[in-house]
Image (cartoon, rainbow, N blue to C red):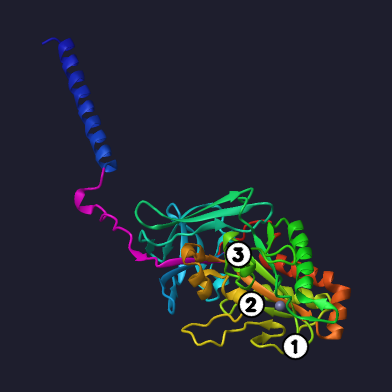
Amino acid sequence: MSEKIQGFLVLRRFLLSLLLLSLLFLGLLLSACGPEPREEEAPPALPPSSRPLSAIYVHGESALLYAHASYAERELFPHLELWQGEAPVFLWEAEEPVNKGLLLWQIPPGDYSLRCGEDLLSVAEDVHLPAGYTITRQESNLHWQFYRDEGGFLGLRLEAVAELPEDVYDILIDPGHGGIDPGASGNGLVEAEQNLQAALYLEELFSAMGLKVALSRYDAEIPGASWEEDNPYASGARVDQVYRKQAKYLLSSHLNAGGGSGFQLYSSVYTDTDWAGRVQAQLLASGWHGDENGLGWVEDALYKRSSSQRTLIPRDYYFIIRETGGYALSPYTYRLFRIDRHAELAQGAEALLLEYMFLDNAGDAQYWKDNWKELVAAVAAGSAEYWQLDAAEQPLPKE
Ligand SMILES: [Zn+2]
């Protein structure tokens, strides 16, 4: 064999070895990056556990999610997490006052799934899922909608809108009495007339704040046929209007009589007194004083008056608070009157009833004649504070 051929054979053996080594190395590399051996595979993810949702009631801008909801017994989900994709982005701890539920206006626009701890909330097909709007802040509203997703679990979608539909309002102002009912009178004042005058001015101030406002009556008459004057539940009458206009807040304006001096503020027995407290502070700052001698006194001039009728659960004394609050309260009369509108009662308004002063007290009556505009302006300022109309940015999620 020539040296040339021998040299060629050596070179070929060397090249073949090199090729084999490279293949071996590549094989090792691939097996290192490849899938884990079968016996070490992670167990498949369990399907998420769930708890059934019983009902959602909305009071003002506060949504209450119930694990259990019957007339006499209710159980809120103790805490909620709003998830986007694989992460919770908004947390909520349940509180008892119905105006401190999941505050819809504080949730950034988006599409969320809802959980209580590890559990998704399952929704049966017959559970009513409400939808609506938050009030106008910074010239914008949020449209919100609870929905049942493809898997049968609860979702919530919020979207900013520039304008409310024609028949949807932020606030309803209720000038008390009217029609055949003049209310109290004294010292040259008739309550129904003064209530209307105050309500019209309040409408002007709220509108200037960008709110969409309606009045339950715009003149001496009560809307509807004459037989409806005594029936606030009839179609188009004051209680009915709150639901039809989807008002989130209701301010009922009155003047008092029967001995006393100063203002009184009535909140529902189911809410806290935050709204009333803001208005109270503004009324005091304007130079006026409160009255503490009414029934249902809580503190200062703040009241929560319960009905004395024996019922399974507490009820508000004043129908305009009790019957306009939706199922979060106990609107038993409207429920009976309007059996065709049960779904609408899942959403009600947060109400504040205000007695500005005692018109049968000569000093109060004179103070009203001289200062009624200042008092109405104080109510507007306190309410705007409570509604945080000038909240420039969405607040941070609750921890
Ligand atoms: Zn009155």
Of pointers 2 and 1, the one earlier in the residue sequence: 1
SS at badge 3: helix
Of pointers 2 and 3, the one earlier in the residue sequence: 3
The residue labelled by disc 3 is 242
Cα gap from disc 1 to disc 3, whole angstroms:
29 Å
The nearer-to-camera label among 2 and 3 is: 3
Q: Is residue 123 above or below residue 365?
A: above
Which residue extends farthest front? 226
Q: Which residues are magenta?
A: 35-61
> Disc 3 beta carbon < 8 A from ligand 1?
no
Q: Name the mark on residue 120.
A: none
The residue labelled by disc 1 is 258
SS at badge 1: loop
The percent coordinates of residue 228 (x first, y second) are: 61, 68
The verdict on residue 117 being magenta is: no
Q: Residue at x 79, y 78 (%)?
A: 284
Q: Is residue 167 above or below residue 78?
A: above
Q: Is residue 308 above or below residue 191?
A: below
Cα gap from disc 2 to disc 3, whole angstroms:
17 Å
